[in-house]
Image: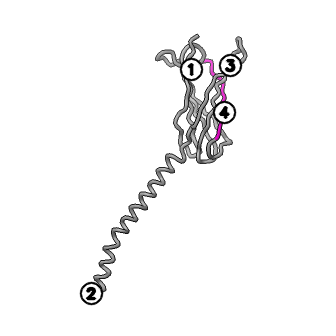
Amino acid sequence: MAQREASKARMRTSSRPLLVALAVLATALTLAHVSVGATEISRPRIASKSFELQGSRPGPNYTVTVVAKLTVCDESAGPLTALVKERKFVGDDELGARSFTRTIWAAKGGCNRYVLRWRLGDEFFGVGWYTVNIRMSGNAGAVSKPAGRAWFTGD
């Protein structure tokens, strides 16, 4: 009987390090999965960008349309929201600022090309720097890094 108890005690102590190692490995794998899923997979990415200003109707009714062509990669299907921020500077002085959103309803998972257009506001005309930055917000609420462009007008 004493021999049997000694054998059981050896089994308990020899398998304990293996169980601890397996528990640590399982925890590490779970944490790695959560951190990858939370930061890399659900965050949209602007893979390429192209911006241009298009003028039309010369004369007193002159307008400028801002055109942003973006390739956005997002693992989750569902709507994307473009967060647009425009600013106008002359030297260190900010003369105008505007922010707005545009929802892209037809978004599907993977990388897709989108074109955004909007009319340049009157406060952004004239001499100085005009800047535009766009960030994309995915279905899960994560936001991409900004993509932007700046133009200088020196009349």
User: Which residue, as the protein is rendered here, is positioned at the far front?
Assistant: 48
- The Cα–Cα distance between marks 3 and 2, rounded to whole angstroms, is 96 Å
Residue 54 picture quarter? top right
- The Cα–Cα distance between marks 1 and 3, rounded to whole angstroms, is 14 Å
Please state which amino acid type lies under the numbered disc 4: Val
Numbered tag placed on residue 104 in the rendering: none
Is label 3 in a helix, a strand or a loop?
A: strand
Report the residue marked by disc 4: 115
Is label 2 in a helix, a strand or a loop?
A: helix
Q: Earlier in the sequence, mark 2 or mark 1?
A: 2
Report the residue marked by disc 1: 151
Residue at the spot 56% in from the left edge and 42% down from the top edge: 44
Residue 95, above or below 38: above
Would residue 127 be visible to someone looking at this image? yes
Is label 1 in a helix, a strand or a loop?
A: strand
Q: Earlier in the sequence, mark 1 or mark 4?
A: 4
Bounds of the magenta span? 112-123
